[in-house]
Amino acid sequence: MITLTFHPERGATTILVRGTYFRICADQTLRGPDNDIAASYSDYIWRLALRECRAFECDSPVYLRVRGREGPFHSIGPYEFLRVKEGAIFTHDMRLGVHAPNERLGRLLEVWHEIVLLRPNPVSVRR
């Protein structure tokens, strides 16, 4: 199970969202396994129902399956920690990619149009 921790505005209690995987789609929505919208992103804010959050984090191992405007998906990771804020995805202080270009991020070579957060596959043990 993947747990995303959203950090609301104004010091409110964090929000935990759990699912087997999550997708950030080209329409700037965050969707879970049932394809329902868990959150939407615009103007540097993630909106979860009536709550507004600047960022969310995942502090368990995840792979990213990403696709640009054209071309196939490719997988990267695993990453022990991710932070999604200001239209970009970071691991610690390193920017991995961008899902929502904006003036704060500067000139970009590539924008990811779909990002899937996946759990690592369990290692099968032979006996």
Image: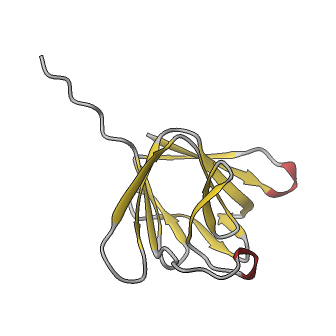
- The x and y percentages for residue 14 are 72, 45
Identified at 46% across, 76% down, the residue is 113
Identified at 52% across, 38% down, the residue is 60
User: What colouring method underlies this structural image?
Assistant: secondary structure
Q: Quadrant of the N terminus?
A: top left
- The x and y percentages for residue 51 are 73, 60
- The x and y percentages for residue 89 are 59, 61
Identified at 43% across, 49% down, the residue is 77
> Between 24 and 50, which is closer to the camera in this rendering?
24
Most distant residue in the right direction? 10
Quarter assignment of residue 53: bottom right
Most distant residue in the left direction? 127
> Between 55 and 10, which is closer to the camera in this rendering?
55
Q: Is residue 9 above or below residue 81?
A: below
Quarter assignment of residue 45: bottom right
How many numbered badges does the structure rendering display? 0
Quarter assignment of residue 95: bottom right
Identified at 77% across, 44% down, the residue is 13
Determine whether, in the image, residue 30 is placed left or right of residue 105.
left
Q: Quadrant of the C terminus?
A: top left
Most distant residue in the top direction? 127
- The x and y percentages for residue 104 are 76, 76
Q: Is residue 21 above or below residue 120?
A: below
Q: Is residue 60 above or below residue 113?
A: above
Determine whether, in the image, residue 13 is placed left or right of residue 21.
right
